[in-house]
Image (spheres, rainbow, N blue to C red):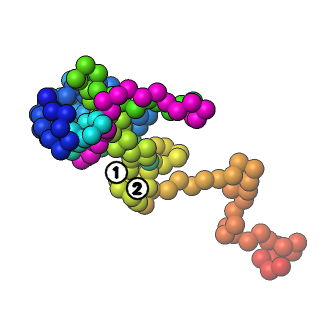
Amino acid sequence: VVHRQPGSRVVKTRRVPVGDWANDVSSVGAGESTELEVDFGFESAQDGILLTSEVDTPIRAECVRCLEPLDWDETVEIEEFYSYDPQEPPSGGDSGTDSVPSVQHGRIDTEPAFRDAMLLALPLRPLCRDDCPGLCAQCGVRLADHPGHVHEQLDQRWAGLADIPLNGPKESGPNGSTEA
């Protein structure tokens, strides 16, 4: 409970279940039933409540080049203002603009702010390392494990020339001699 006196602050610790929060290449959490312990700070302002939090969350992804699984912790900062008076989106403006989040019956819904901050922390193109060479386009071997890996690539239009001996024995001339 935050008093409506500007400047008053309350910190609450909550266990927050992480849903199926993911983008196309990464996801929040280390498993399906991940719960994070989060310290939420609620600070009263003149016309609303400011929510602040910083949370370390596990991230799971695959390198977009070599498909190696990646797991790491990401620190995510959350800051959202909740108005005491519900506001409608401005008329004539962007039709995709959402209304300002508001305090409803003395409570605020932190889940949208928490989810949005987590999803924005996910990388769009995670890499195992900046210079990851990826996979071989011919056979799919991971090039970081086989740095000298190459395939002899022959253009099929020139495949018939492969049968011609270039350094073979010289053919004999018209007299049977090897001189030209």
Q: Residue at x 40, y 32 (%)?
A: 100
| Position in image of residue 37 (x %, y %) | 14, 34
Q: CA distance from mark 1 to mark 2?
A: 7 Å
Question: Residue pushed farthest bottom?
Answer: 179
Q: Residue at x 57, y 34 (%)?
A: 94
In this view, 125 is above or below 116: below
In the picture of the structure, the residue carrying the numbered disc 2 is 132
Seen from the viewer's position, the closer of residues 142 and 129 is 129
Q: Residue at x 34, y 44 (%)?
A: 121
Q: Specify whether 60 is left or right of 148.
A: left
In this view, 167 is above or below 13: below
Q: Could you say whether the residue bearing mark 2 is in a helix, strand or loop?
A: loop
Tell me where the magenta segment starts and ends, as one range. 75-94
User: Which amino acid, mark 1?
Assistant: Cys
Residue 129 in view of the camera = yes
Seen from the viewer's position, the closer of residues 168 and 101 is 101
Which label sits on residue 155? none
Q: Quadrant of residue 52?
A: top left
Q: Is residue 61 magenta?
A: no
In the picture of the structure, the residue carrying the numbered disc 1 is 128
Residue contact at pointers 1 and 2, CB within 8 angstroms: yes
